[in-house]
Image: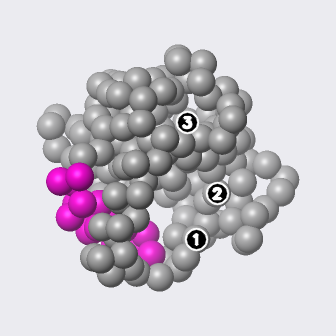
């Protein structure tokens, strides 16, 4: 798989299309990262500064094990999905724009990512950590075919596919 996620560029679901994140997406990603609910349900549990976010994005875009995509619906950015690859497993992180939540966009983003990434064979398993109070994410991962595992990781629920 390509560093920027080019293998999955243009991956589609009937509702969304994924495109690789570009450096000029930094402001949009920063806005989504520091959204109240995103902070509340994140592993760190805190907002980040713009400098921290810019440095994080630069590192992620250089990291050959990270794939980042912007999801667009009718040409409008509605969310992002990140995949951190370790051997045959990809750990998934997703953010949906505040105004898009609760209408099935999250599961559409996940399904588009699954179709594009899994078709390459480079990743055969997907894993995600979901905050137990994040009912919207819980529904999105379930609708995308992820199974809740018995284990928990640092207070987060573990979901896996297949």
Query: Image point 35% across, 42% down: which residue?
Result: 69
| Relative image position of residue 84 (x, y in whole percent) | 55, 46
| Relative image position of residue 29 (x, y in whole percent) | 29, 60
* 14 sits left or right of 93 in the view: left
| Relative image position of residue 141 (x, y in whole percent) | 57, 45
User: Which mark's residue is nearer the viewer, 1 or 3?
Assistant: 1
Give the quarter of the image for residue 86: top right
Q: Which residue is mark 2?
A: 129
Quick check: is 26 in the magenta stretch? yes
* Label 1, residues with CA under 10 Å away: few <14, some 14-19, many ≥20: some
Cα–Cα gap, marks 2 and 3: 14 Å
| Relative image position of residue 105 (x, y in whole percent) | 37, 44
Query: Image point 23% across, 52% down: which residue?
Result: 23
User: Which mark's residue is nearer the viewer, 2 or 3?
Assistant: 2
Quadrant assignment for the C terminus:
top right
Residue range highlighted in magenta: 23-39
Residue 146, visible in the rendered structure: no
Quick check: is 5 in the magenta stretch? no
Total marks placed = 3
Label 1 SS: loop
Q: Which residue is mark 3?
A: 144
Q: Is residue 123 above or below residue 133?
A: above
Q: Which residue is mark 1?
A: 43
Q: Are marks 1 and 3 in contact (CB under 8 Å)?
A: no
Nearest the camera: 56 or 71?
56
* Label 3, residues with CA under 10 Å away: few <14, some 14-19, many ≥20: some
Nearest the camera: 22 or 78?
22
* Label 2, residues with CA under 10 Å away: few <14, some 14-19, many ≥20: many
Q: Are marks 2 and 1 in contact (CB under 8 Å)?
A: yes
Q: Is residue 155 above or below residue 76?
A: below
Cα–Cα gap, marks 2 and 1: 9 Å
């Amino acid at each position: 798989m390509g560093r920027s996620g080019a293998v999955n560029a243009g991956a589609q679901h009937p509702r969304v299309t994924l495109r690789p994140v570009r450096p000029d997406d930094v402001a949009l990603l920063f806005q989504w990262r520091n959204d109240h609910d995103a902070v509340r349900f994140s592993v760190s549990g805190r907002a980040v500064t713009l400098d921290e976010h810019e440095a994080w994005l630069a590192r992620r875009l250089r990291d050959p094990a990270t794939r980042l995509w912007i999801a667009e619906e009718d040409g409008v950015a509605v969310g992002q999905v990140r995949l951190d690859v370790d051997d045959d497993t990809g750990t998934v992180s997703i953010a949906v724009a505040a105004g898009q939540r609760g209408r099935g966009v999250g599961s559409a983003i996940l399904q588009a990512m699954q179709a594009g990434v899994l078709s390459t064979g480079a990743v055969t398993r997907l894993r995600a950590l979901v905050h137990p109070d994040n009912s919207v994410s819980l529904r999105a991962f379930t609708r995308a075919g992820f199974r809740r595992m018995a284990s928990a990781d640092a207070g987060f629920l573990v979901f896996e596919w297949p």
